[in-house]
Amino acid sequence: MKMIEAIIKPFKLDDVKEALAGIGVEGMTVSEVKGFGRQKGHTEIYRGSEYAVDFLPKIKLEIVVADAQVEAALQAIAAAARTGKIGDGKLFVLPVEQAVRIRTAERDDQAV
Amino acid sequence: MKMIEAIIKPFKLDDVKEALAGIGVEGMTVSEVKGFGRQKGHTEIYRGSEYAVDFLPKIKLEIVVADAQVEAALQAIAAAARTGKIGDGKLFVLPVEQAVRIRTAERDDQAV
Amino acid sequence: MKMIEAIIKPFKLDDVKEALAGIGVEGMTVSEVKGFGRQKGHTEIYRGSEYAVDFLPKIKLEIVVADAQVEAALQAIAAAARTGKIGDGKLFVLPVEQAVRIRTAERDDQAV
Amino acid sequence: MLKLCPWILLAAGLCLVTVGFGLMATARADTLPDPTLEQRLADLEAYVNNGPRTAEVAGRIAGAGPGHNAWMMTAAALVLFMTLPGLALFYGGLVRRKNVLSVLAQCLGIAGLVTILWWAVGYSLVFAPGRSLLGGLKFAFLNGVGSAPNPDYAGWVSQNVFAMFQLMFAVITPALIVGAIAERMKYSAVLLFVALWMLVIYFPLAHMVWGVDGLMNGAWNAAARIKAIDFAGGTVVHMSSGWSALLLCWILGKRHGFGRVIMAPHSMVLCMIGTGMLWVGWYGFNAGSALAADGIAANAFMTTTLAAAVASVAWAGAEWLLRGKPSVLGFCSGVVAGLVVVTPACGFITANGAILIGVLAGVIPFFACWKLKTWLGYDDALDTFGIHGVGGTLGALLTGFLATPEANANLATHLEGIVGHTLWLHQLAAMGITLALALPGTLVIACLVKFTLGLRPSAEEELQGLDVVDHGEAGYLLD
Amino acid sequence: MLKLCPWILLAAGLCLVTVGFGLMATARADTLPDPTLEQRLADLEAYVNNGPRTAEVAGRIAGAGPGHNAWMMTAAALVLFMTLPGLALFYGGLVRRKNVLSVLAQCLGIAGLVTILWWAVGYSLVFAPGRSLLGGLKFAFLNGVGSAPNPDYAGWVSQNVFAMFQLMFAVITPALIVGAIAERMKYSAVLLFVALWMLVIYFPLAHMVWGVDGLMNGAWNAAARIKAIDFAGGTVVHMSSGWSALLLCWILGKRHGFGRVIMAPHSMVLCMIGTGMLWVGWYGFNAGSALAADGIAANAFMTTTLAAAVASVAWAGAEWLLRGKPSVLGFCSGVVAGLVVVTPACGFITANGAILIGVLAGVIPFFACWKLKTWLGYDDALDTFGIHGVGGTLGALLTGFLATPEANANLATHLEGIVGHTLWLHQLAAMGITLALALPGTLVIACLVKFTLGLRPSAEEELQGLDVVDHGEAGYLLD
Amino acid sequence: MLKLCPWILLAAGLCLVTVGFGLMATARADTLPDPTLEQRLADLEAYVNNGPRTAEVAGRIAGAGPGHNAWMMTAAALVLFMTLPGLALFYGGLVRRKNVLSVLAQCLGIAGLVTILWWAVGYSLVFAPGRSLLGGLKFAFLNGVGSAPNPDYAGWVSQNVFAMFQLMFAVITPALIVGAIAERMKYSAVLLFVALWMLVIYFPLAHMVWGVDGLMNGAWNAAARIKAIDFAGGTVVHMSSGWSALLLCWILGKRHGFGRVIMAPHSMVLCMIGTGMLWVGWYGFNAGSALAADGIAANAFMTTTLAAAVASVAWAGAEWLLRGKPSVLGFCSGVVAGLVVVTPACGFITANGAILIGVLAGVIPFFACWKLKTWLGYDDALDTFGIHGVGGTLGALLTGFLATPEANANLATHLEGIVGHTLWLHQLAAMGITLALALPGTLVIACLVKFTLGLRPSAEEELQGLDVVDHGEAGYLLD
Ligand SMILES: Nc1ncnc2c1ncn2[C@@H]1O[C@H](COP(=O)(O)OP(=O)(O)O)[C@@H](O)[C@H]1O
Ligand SMILES: Nc1ncnc2c1ncn2[C@@H]1O[C@H](COP(=O)(O)OP(=O)(O)O)[C@@H](O)[C@H]1O
Ligand SMILES: Nc1ncnc2c1ncn2[C@@H]1O[C@H](COP(=O)(O)OP(=O)(O)O)[C@@H](O)[C@H]1O
């Protein structure tokens, strides 16, 4: 099993979810994060003070899939999340050694 | 060392924390996430518009433990977090290659 | 490639960012988390009720770097984040098997 | 679906009834003699002095007086402001995030429901002449309640404005109860409970205290058996709601996880906004209860200010001494406690009386919330009993000791010989009657609702939060 | 940078013009005879009764009357409160987090812009005597608008207070439109649109309805061709803004992602705070429109309360029946709908009329927002049309049927024989004229803005949110 | 624990003192002759005109007049609303999330503390007759301050209402200082500083400007050495707090991380809500300062509206021109700046004067906040100096040039020959005295507090945020 950690633009979440559903991946865990990278932020000005807001809102998805599904999932996410503009985000694949479904105590591939 | 990533129902956090303390694990990092999975969300209606809120609030725990403690921790978390109802969550185990305690620069098993 | 997961004190974020920039690391993903550990929280009292707020606000950084950069990055972060007081945080290093830049479909070391 | 029947039916029923209801033309015998210049002058002076009109002549002033009407419209709007959004925010900020909308919905629903009841029968049962325990039906459906003043209550204020001013009191009283049962009572049950509570408890009680022929209207009803006084609602509003709330939250049981889970306020900021609005609105409540922009209103304005400010300092000061830190919730609680305790007294006491009330209002409810609640172990979620029950009781009693004709000459009319002597015994009697009506009444109503609609949501629903469960909405969407 | 020229230039231009403008000394012929005691008494009674002053003598009362002035200052402040922060919060809570400041900025900008227009020409074009379609320039730059009353409108209220009271109406009307076009219109375009809309639509319309020689001022202008009545702005305020909003949001097009992305309110709590403020402020709007603290104001106060409360119950009740849950947004929408529908009627109807209005105001706009919007497919983001357009239209019509001299004796002056008979036809005519002015006017103005400044931000900007794009700020910083 | 002694002791001490204090019976010699019809009429007319009562007869009007009392109670409530929750939100929204409650607690604590001081000695030191620099102790503990008017100030308003109205000014003035020192001053130090500041600076200054025998009360004290005018508090309220704030924040030093860390407002939404409330409440402040619902109040209402609106447009317009985007904070800052600058002038100027004030109020404080602060490098966290210090100074001076008897006939009484000529020199003198009192006073008090309680929390505490450190609470709990 692998965990795919995907950092994407917030408004692409629905598209990515649909794309994953399309290849049979229905489970995932989502969090709001802030990204630093090449994409430039904006400036906020409050009376005398200027602040360079260099963090940008991003969505992080964690999706655990069986090894065989990894490549399909990467393709699906990348295709759905791409706008072609800087800041589209990254996909990282991490190894997962075990998985447990809490409700049933099923393990590993059965668990996700 | 391993990192256990546990996705649980929010109101189970206190129970899980106690269960972990019970086996000597005192450190962890918690974040609020949203889960998609088999568990169904609810519908919100605002005047003319219906929205299927299909993400559900979950708590994510990250706990780094020595290899020997992994199984005990998994058992403890699963037992404490289980309600038997759909949506109880998952446990994932990821390998950790190094750990550093920033304050002391201690490394690896000493660091957690 | 490795993912360095750094848990630090919130007000150290700017220092850490600068330190990483100093060794050429410009990309990272940040989230707000809560830490449990040795550091003690505070007590909040609302009329008749006392609550021990034992979670503490922390910042989590996820930074994916090439294997060769890991040690330098660990040093840089630890130096910048250290106050010497309890609760300074941890660094964990996890293996990353693949990386993709969504915009260009570049892979692995090119992607980060 | 079925569960909302009581409410819908009530509203619908009342609407239908009114259709068949003929509109009474206000007959007016214009055969009185013309006034002399002197009488016309006297009438104008009566307006300025808020005195009685010259009777027996066809006065040239048709209706209400602008200064008094202006103030009473302002006051009525201020009292509405206390509930919407004042109290809703004060309470809404104190619950957990998942229940904030349920509190707002309860305040909104109560405002709507009570207005309908008030229009249909409530105003009449309280303020129409009747018997000493309950008013008549003369003003049902607000018939005959026009812009002319009703001299039984306020000679220079339009009766429709008076009726709306009093409506706002009827709205906020049951809304106070929401604080005790927050986070764990079904929405339909709240509404049904409130509807019955108004009919069984509030309307009779308000008539007894403020009705022209009410049993304990010591200041205005010469025939009152109990010569008690209650300027703006210590018994009617705060004791009745506070003690009913205690009983109801005891019947209801504790919130799941009470004492184990963190149930801290999700937004002290909202709570403080609500507090500010309550304070500002309370000027309408207290100074408005003079029913005129006269010297009594002016005095009530001052005593209200002093009591609120001193109590806030006293409560926060007690925290500082006993716990090391003064909290925003402490200041806010003190403000509200000071306002509650001064409510029955505000029009009858001097500045120094108000200062004393402020000190006691800061300290005694503080102990009720801090210690009493822990000892007795009830889950009064937002301290309705600790503040309104205890505070209202304290205020009603203190009024008995601190009221003085020096502050309000009316006390020398029917109450000479009582004020300053045995008044406090009459106050005790009034407090006893309030409890004798509120407690058994609440018990019966709560049981009735429990065995029909049921009082509580399922444990799962309670954990999920009432916002989503009862209203299908979320308070905040932060992404 | 260039884009803000219209606005800056307008303001700057007006400022310069006024420099050369001479201040008119208010000449006063003090050669009238001294009043008798009887006349002095009559003047005082006229003050209390809000009647006409004794003419032809040198009355001893120099200016306005304190009771009426007090109420009108309060009312004007309340109507400002409706917009800032009331409406801003009501709307601000309903948009997504990334656009909340853009809504606030629109309300603030409109308040500023309209005040400048009002000072320069607006007040004069509406309330100076002129022709039946538009007032004159006598009061341009508020010249001659002092503390003495203008007996054309309110004999006992200072004209400057009257002017500010009416300004607050002029501010909130275009701000209502913001609800329809929220989240997707450029800030500069909003301001230019509003400036033109005021000049072309609001000022003429308000003159026709309320101007002393206005075309459809049935109650006060004996020469009015259309004998319609509109107490506080059903046509002028709600129909004009509601229908213009419909057209504008149709010209503008839908928000990106409309129907696909979740566009739920980011803070129902803010929305509810705003609702409470709107309700409280609306007493200034409706009861203030009596322009005195008299019996008509008192009656409007009552009808406003009843309609708002009943409509909130009706709307939430409809939700409960048809969808299983009453929502906070339902209660809030019902409150606002009730207030909108009763606006043109409030000073002319009885309590029972208000109850009927409440029921219809809860049900009909509910269906407009629930079904009509879906059928027709326009993106009226926050339901300006569904509530103000539909509600204003409904209210203007119902006024024709429910107005009665029993509630307001003034209806028996110029309108005897019409009220209770053909009044509704006159109302229909007034509604027709309102649409005939508002719709083509909006079409032309919107096109003009579209082809000069452009109406919408780029898709990318819209996705990022208008707060950052148009104002360089974020609504909340939660870390 | 020890640290709160000053405050507790103060409160407790005052409470004790009052116990021994006898209540003065207000003796009244009723041996005056009966009034004639003519005199009774004249009295009624005096009420309507806000003129002086007929002396030397036993007038039939016992106390205050309802229209004026109604307005002044409303105005006092509005001014409280400015602080709680208005200013608390305006400031609370501008700090970082971890300090929001500390700002609210400072506003609440100041409200309580100042009320106690006011009751004990403050009202008396300001408004009891005394010497030109400070009032006497006649009204200590509000003794003798009843519902009868005090003709030295307002012949038709109850003195207790007048005292509460003025209290609200005394509350908001030190609360303004909070903006400069936000996020970095110990709570106990804030309270001690404020208590001393009131005694040493505010009470004398307010007496000099508004006291019946005050040194610079040009409008009402014929014997005033400095014939300056200040309608609603340009010197007393805004200059005194603004300049003291500058000095205090300079003594205090900068926040940790100033200029390096993002210190952006955590909630512009709260800030805007507060702004709306400030604007609405300011009508009580400015129009209320007429101390009657008369034509002067009416004029002040108009000028206040115009200045606020124009300044908001000017400030945001300046941002738009110079930085490309108009911000919500810009509009809000402009509104407040406009209100500040027009405060001393509002009852003395015409509409056109108000427009001019609006333009300057938008532009000059904007530059102070934008450039001056950067040049001089002080950390005036929320721009108390930039807006209140600079704005108050500007307003006091402009009043010297723009005041005109055309707007306020009272200017022709004691000030004929000065208004329109050398008035601005008197204004300059008054401004000088204000600074001469405020700056050394603040320096001494700040040092005193610094070397007893200490001014700042530890760096660690400041980083953690004052909410948890000083109050043991969190502003929001979002999970
Ligand atoms: N080395 C990295 N480790 C972790 N996250 C990264 C890294 N580099 C970039 N990111 C994440 O990816 C997001 C997009 O990266 P960015 O460099 O802005 O553009 P692009 O995706 O087009 O290369 C960043 O906002 C950040 O969240
Ligand atoms: N493949 C997955 N990868 C990551 N997280 C998952 C995955 N599947 C489920 N989850 C997480 O686990 C939670 C519970 O899963 P769900 O399918 O709803 O029920 P259950 O835990 O009973 O199987 C989800 O809300 C989601 O946060
Ligand atoms: N075993 C662990 N797994 C994951 N995170 C941990 C673990 N132990 C500590 N942490 C994180 O590190 C933070 C700091 O740890 P703590 O024990 O308080 O102090 P120190 O860093 O000085 O050892 C915690 O708040 C928590 O977020």
Image: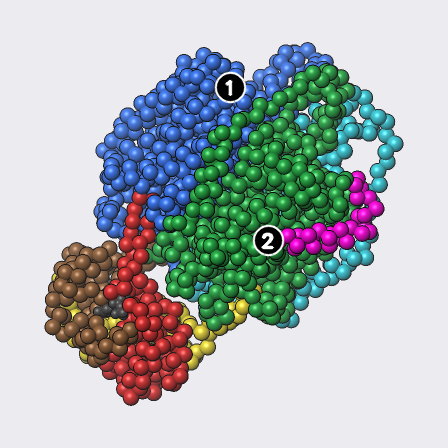
Chain colours: A yellow, B brown, C red, D blue, E cyan, F green
Secondary structure category for the residue under label 2: helix
Secondary structure category for the residue under label 1: helix
Residue F417 magenta: yes
Q: Ligand 3: does it lie within 8 Å of the C-beta at label 2?
A: no
| Along the viewing direction, whichever of D190 and D250 lies nearer the viewer | D250
Residue E365 magenta: no
Task: Give the quarter of the image for residue C96.
Answer: bottom left
Task: Give the quarter of the image for residue A96.
Answer: bottom left
Neighbourhood count class around disc 2 (C-alpha, 10 Å): few under 14, some 14–19, many 20 upward: some
The answer to whether the residue labelled 2 contacts the one labelled 1, judged by CB atoms less than 8 Å apart, is no
Numbered disc 1: what chain? D
User: Is residue D137 something one can see in this rendering?
Assistant: no
Do circles 2 and 1 both sit on a common chain? no
| Along the viewing direction, whichever of E358 and A70 lies nearer the viewer | A70
Please state which amino acid type lies under the numbered disc 2: Gly
Task: Give the quarter of the image for residue C29.
Answer: bottom left
Task: Give me the residue at 45% from left, 12% from top.
Answer: D223
Neighbourhood count class around disc 1 (C-alpha, 10 Å): few under 14, some 14–19, many 20 upward: many
From the image, give the main secondary structure of the stretch colored magenta: helix
Task: Give me the residue at 54% from left, 53% from top.
Answer: F445
| Along the viewing direction, whichever of E80 and E340 lies nearer the viewer | E80
Please determine whether, in this image, residue D135 is positioned above or below residue E243. Answer: above
Task: Give me the residue at 14% from left, 70% from top.
Answer: B70
Q: Quadrant of ligand 2?
A: bottom left
Horizontal side, residue D217 vs residue E320: left or right: right
What span is colored magenta in the figure?
F412-438
Please state which amino acid type lies under the numbered disc 1: Leu
Q: Which residue is mark 1?
A: D411
Q: Position of residue F88 (x, y in %)?
A: 50, 51
